[in-house]
Image (tube, grey):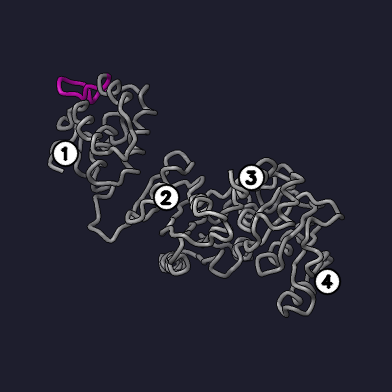
């Protein structure tokens, strides 16, 4: 276990400073929060927390007079009554007083920084700005997030995404690592319909609660190893973009690492894996459904249909999609077969399920999957012409 693993585990152990802090109207009053760093995101965090009655202390290694921007932010916060402490003497560890319930860190601070390491050692929860922004959303009707990460191309993609959303008539913006603090977007007086969120590996390291509608990892290459300590830790942080995704995890077909991150992700039930590529597009799920006889389309999600969809996925979709279909089939093993599909030429369901449970679904050996499945299922019964694919 690496040092970052240990610190991350310490952060996970006690992640809730107070029950119920899941939306902006929760009881934040009296919560003693240390904000680490007085950059743009640190200032936004301190301001949002102070506005909701938290007792806020801000520390930054920049001494007075060293940065005009930091001095201006410190002055504004001091007028509001926030305790601002500038200079390296205030970043050698957690302040001795007051005691703190929570630390909110800026993305540039490594987990091994003395302040954060000290907080973790004392069991004080540590949140990143992304975690705080997610918990500052409206209790009802909050704008969904579409999250994007990757070693290269994040900003271009997020800005393009926001432009597409606005062109579709939605009130949308880009925020996060792209420049605009997420808290500003989340707490904007005129709520957005959707937010395109750029996330760096630094930001992703601290997030736990984020649950986007869709997420994407464009590519992964060795970067920021000095911050993360190893490529494996960097890769693990990038993979957190897919955690708790609802609708679609988008990955790069040309980058197997991004595909593996989707396979390893803990997502919301029903979430799909969608690969993008410069190659010839495969069939969409609508096109795939159109291959079926009209009488059978109402049973598109039945157990038998999943067999055939898995077979088709072997040829027209990524391994991730095929694996997801097999897993769905396994979950439906106890489901009854629709009476409409019973008959002389019906799929040999029980035999097929028995065979399927014995299959090794390790998809690096994917070449073995289609022949085994063909032995189990009479594909032509459900989807004529499937073999031709």
Residue at image coords 57%, 56%:
228
Q: Reading the chain from its start, which is encountered first: label 2 or label 3?
A: 3
Report which residue position mark 4 lands on. 79
Region of the chain picked out in magenta, as a range: 339-350
The local secondary structure at tag 4 comes to helix
Residue at image coords 38%, 49%:
259
Left or right of 315, for residue 115: right
Q: Where in the figure is residue 187, as x and y percent of width and height? A: 64, 62
* Numbered tag placed on residue 6 in the rendering: 3
Report which residue position mark 1 lands on. 386
* Mark 4 vs 2: CB contact within 8 A: no
Left or right of 204, for residue 45: right
Left or right of 212, for residue 103: right
Callout in the foreground (4, 3) = 3
* Mark 2 vs 3: CB contact within 8 A: no
Spatial CA distance of label 4 from label 2 is 44 Å
* Numbered tag placed on residue 298 in the rendering: none
Spatial CA distance of label 1 from label 3 is 50 Å
Q: Reading the chain from its start, which is encountered first: label 4 or label 3?
A: 3
Q: Reading the chain from its start, which is encountered first: label 4 or label 2?
A: 4
* Numbered tag placed on residue 249 in the rendering: 2
Q: Reading the chain from its start, which is encountered first: label 1 or label 2?
A: 2
């Amino acid at each position: 276990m690496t040092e970052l693993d240990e610190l991350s585990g310490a952060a996970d152990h006690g992640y809730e400073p107070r029950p119920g802090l899941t939306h902006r109207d929760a009881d934040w009053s009296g919560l003693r929060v240390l904000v680490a760093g007085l950059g743009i995101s640190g200032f936004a965090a301190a301001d949002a927390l102070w506005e909701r009655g938290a007792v806020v202390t801000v520390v930054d290694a920049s001494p007075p007079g060293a940065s005009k921007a930091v001095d201006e932010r410190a002055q504004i916060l001091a007028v509001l009554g926030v305790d601002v402490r500038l200079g390296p003497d205030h970043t050698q560890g957690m302040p001795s007083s007051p005691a703190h319930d929570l630390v909110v860190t800026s993305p540039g601070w490594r987990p091994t920084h003395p302040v954060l390491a000290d907080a973790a050692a004392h069991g004080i929860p540590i949140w990143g700005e992304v975690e705080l922004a997610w918990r500052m959303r409206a209790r009802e009707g909050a704008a969904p997030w579409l999250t994007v990460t990757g070693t290269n191309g994040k900003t271009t993609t997020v800005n393009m995404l926001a432009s597409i959303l606005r062109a579709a008539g939605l009130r949308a913006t880009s925020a996060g690592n792209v420049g605009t603090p997420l808290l500003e977007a989340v707490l904007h007086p005129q709520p957005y319909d959707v937010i395109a969120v750029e996330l760096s590996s630094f930001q992703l390291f601290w997030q736990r609660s984020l649950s986007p509608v869709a997420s994407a990892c464009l590519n992964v290459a060795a970067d920021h190893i000095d911050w993360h300590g190893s490529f494996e830790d960097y890769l693990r942080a990038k993979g957190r973009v897919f955690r708790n995704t609802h609708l679609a995890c988008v990955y790069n077909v040309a980058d197997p690492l991004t595909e593996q991150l989707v396979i390893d992700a803990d997502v919301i039930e029903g979430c799909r894996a969608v690969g993008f590529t410069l190659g010839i597009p495969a069939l969409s799920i609508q096109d795939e459904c159109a291959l079926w006889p009209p009488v059978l389309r109402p049973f598109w999600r039945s157990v038998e249909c999943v067999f055939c969809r898995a077979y088709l996925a072997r040829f027209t979709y990524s391994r991730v999609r095929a694996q997801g279909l097999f897993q769905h089939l396994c979950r439906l093993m106890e489901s009854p077969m629709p009476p409409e599909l019973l008959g002389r030429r019906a799929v040999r369901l029980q035999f097929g399920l028995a065979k399927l449970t014995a299959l090794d679904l390790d998809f690096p050996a994917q070449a073995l999957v289609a022949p085994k499945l063909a032995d189990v299922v009479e594909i032509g019964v459900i989807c004529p012409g499937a073999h031709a694919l």
